[in-house]
Amino acid sequence: MAEIGTDIQKAKDILTQGGLVAIPTETVYGLAANALNVKSVASIFEVKGRPTFDPLIVHVPDLESVKSYSNHLNEHAEILAKHFWPGPLTLLLEKKSIIPDLVTAGLSTVGLRCPDHRVTQTLLSSLPFPLAAPSANPFGYVSPTRPVHVEEQLGNKIDYILDGGPCKVGVESTIVGFPNGRPTVLRLGGIAVEQIEALIGSVDVRTHSTSNPQAPGQLESHYAPRQRVILGDIEDLMTAHADVPYAVMSFNKRYDIPFSYVLSASGSLNEAAANLFQALRTLEKMPVEIILAEQVPDRGLGRAINDRLKRAAG
Ligand code: TXA
Ligand code: MG
């Protein structure tokens, strides 16, 4: 089993030698390797069981270092990075050849992100290379928001888990690309569409699922726990599935049943996002056959939560 610890120097040594380390970020834990070392990057795909057509995000310490990996920071990208970095925003920019094709799955763009987490900031600033890091879960499964989540699933396959506590945002970064120069949200995430639009005006949102391997990994079934997740009105679902052992994951209302999880009793979308993956992991360990869940209000972080719920229900 991988050691869980807070030793940044140890993480640095392992990464420098080409190994894999799980790192904390504000969104979810990442499975990190030296992004410029093809062998290390290849082992990320192997450990995650991830198809190599699905590109990886490259993590950088600051806006300044973008220059090393992309020749062109367009006007909108620059505004967004200045405003939201460090933070849960990934920008798809034309890549320089120093970024291996394996990282970008042969695409001409690279996803760059500067994470907002003290531990990983310190680590990134001390390394002479950026870190490629997908979420630290087996491909298609729920993302990890605590060190123990990583340990449970990848513990025997990686060298070290750098403990940075529970992730405070809890859903992955928002991905913005610029097809034909037009700012486009390709994955809903920790920065709300409203926040982006307040800054640069209206943007396209193109997050519909696809099974087309050429397109970004917005696969229809993802974030999926062991049991089937069924979405709808909780009361209706409880009536319809009365004959099957079920668990309930609700937004703010508590149900008086044996297995239930309330995402945020106070009705906070931020709190609900931070609890979402922990909730799915908790309920999946219960002796139930299905998980009944409801959508949350479709605004702010609620859009990212609903996106994950739909994919979990696959
Ligand atoms: O919050 C996050 O973004 C977390 C933390 C660890 O930083 N990372 C994360 O990585 O969620 P991952 O690999 O689980 O999801 C990255 C998504 C995938 O759907 C991938 O297809 C897409 O980003 N992606 C990465 N580079 C891309 C590119 N150049 N063009 C299009 N999509 C890209
Ligand atoms: Mg992922």
Image (spheres, grey):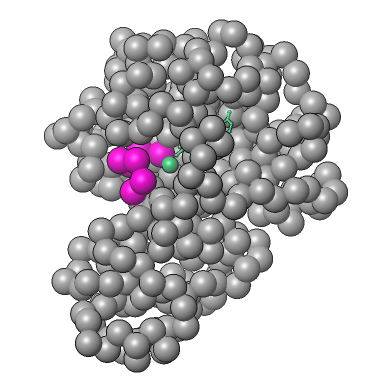
Q: In the rendered view, would you say 12 is above or below 240?
A: above
Q: In the rendered view, would you say 14 is above or below 54?
A: above
Q: Is residue 263 visible?
A: yes
Task: Look at the image and say whether residue 211 sits in the magenta stretch.
Answer: no
Q: Is residue 274 visible?
A: no
> Which quadrant of the figure has residue 261?
bottom left
> Which residue is the extreme one toward the front?
212
Q: On the rendering, which quadrant does ligand 2 occupy? A: top left
Q: Nearer the viewer, residue 168 or 190?
A: 190
The residue depicted at 30 percent of the width and 57 percent of the height is 225
The residue depicted at 46 percent of the width and 62 percent of the height is 309
Q: Nearer the viewer, residue 200 or 61?
A: 200
Q: Nearer the viewer, residue 72 or 261?
A: 72
The span picked out in magenta is: 135-141
Q: Nearer the viewer, residue 110 or 121?
A: 110
Position of 32 compared to 104: left or right? left
Horizontal and vertical percent position of residue 69: 62, 15
Horizontal and vertical percent position of residue 15: 35, 17
Q: Main secondary structure of the magenta part?
A: loop
Q: In the rendered view, would you say 196 is above or below 33?
A: below
Position of 295 compared to 93: left or right? left
Position of 88 compared to 204: left or right? left
Horizontal and vertical percent position of residue 1: 14, 34
The residue depicted at 58 percent of the width and 22 percent of the height is 107
The residue depicted at 56 percent of the width and 36 percent of the height is 215
Horizontal and vertical percent position of residue 258: 23, 82
